[in-house]
Image (tube, rainbow, N blue to C red):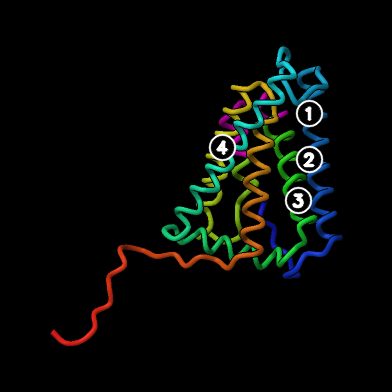
């Protein structure tokens, strides 16, 4: 999900609808791009992908999403930019309702995957499409640029997952899990305090 600066610290339902509308337009653009360039209206799956594959392959995406979230939780006390990013998002999002969080996570995952993996991946390949995906996640502060790099790496993983399974289900599932869990965590938990180096025990008394 792209980080966008806004003057109000607490989003309203109207703002959630605006963000959702943006991702719906992105999804429509991806659908039309795929239809024109590939002469095929099915941007969700490659020919030959069975209904059974459409049912079980999203489980792979859920596993990837949970692994990515777990990795960021492990490193958030070592990488200073992660708590900083947490504060940025927390200041922008405030405390939206669970319905708004679900709407934002679903709209962003579906819209971005249809555009980047459903259309751009076929047209431009995994590397260039992942680079553009990373550029969508350029933050306003230079200290947060590692987030852009991580978005690019995630884009490559999602592109590879899409090429391997032949459908967008796993990428959408992974993207949704990452966004939903992270949005809930950011808006309902205070940022962690990053610690550099080994923590030394405090000495007491003389000697």
Q: Residues within 10 Å of mark 4 (few under 14, many from 20)?
A: many
Q: Which residues are magenta?
A: 118-132
The residue located at (66%, 21%) in the rendering is 166
Q: Residues within 10 Å of mark 2 (few under 14, many from 20)?
A: many
The residue to which callout 3 is attached is 102
The kind of secondary structure element at disc 2 is helix
- Give the quadrant of residue 60: top right
Please identify the quadrant where the C terminus is shown.
bottom left
Residue 26 - label: 2
Q: Residues within 10 Å of mark 3 (few under 14, many from 20)?
A: some
Q: Nearer the viewer, mark 1 or mark 3?
A: 3
- Give the mark, 1 or 3, whose residue is nearer the N terminus: 1
- Give the mark, 4 or 1, whose residue is nearer the N terminus: 1
Q: Residue 86 at what x, y percent from top left?
A: 58, 62
Q: Residue 178 at what x, y percent from top left?
A: 62, 46
The residue to which callout 4 is attached is 64
- Give the quadrant of residue 174: top right
The residue to which callout 1 is attached is 33
The residue located at (51%, 48%) in the rendering is 70
The kind of secondary structure element at disc 4 is helix
Q: Nearer the viewer, residue 141 or 19?
A: 19
Q: Are marks 4 and 3 in contact (CB under 8 Å)?
A: no
């Amino acid at each position: 999900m792209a980080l966008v600066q806004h003057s109000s610290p607490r989003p309203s339902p109207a703002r959630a609808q605006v963000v959702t509308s943006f991702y719906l337009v992105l999804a429509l653009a991806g659908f039309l791009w795929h239809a024109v360039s590939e002469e095929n209206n099915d941007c969700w799956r490659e020919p030959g992908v069975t209904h059974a594959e459409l049912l079980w392959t999203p489980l792979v995406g859920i596993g990837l999403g949970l692994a990515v979230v777990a990795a960021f939780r492990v490193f958030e006390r070592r990488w200073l930019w992660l708590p900083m990013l947490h504060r940025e998002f927390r200041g922008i999002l405030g405390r939206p309702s669970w319905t708004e969080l679900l709407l934002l996570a679903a709209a962003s995952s579906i819209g971005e995957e249809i555009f980047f993996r459903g259309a751009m991946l076929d047209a431009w390949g995994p590397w260039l499409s992942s680079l553009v995906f990373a550029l969508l996640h350029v933050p306003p502060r230079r200290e947060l640029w590692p987030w852009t790099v991580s978005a690019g790496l995630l884009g490559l993983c999602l592109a590879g997952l899409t090429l391997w399974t032949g459908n967008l289900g796993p990428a959408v599932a992974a993207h949704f899990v990452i966004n939903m869990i992270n949005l809930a965590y950011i808006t309902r938990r205070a940022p962690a305090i990053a610690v550099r180096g080994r923590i030394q025990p405090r000495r007491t008394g003389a000697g």
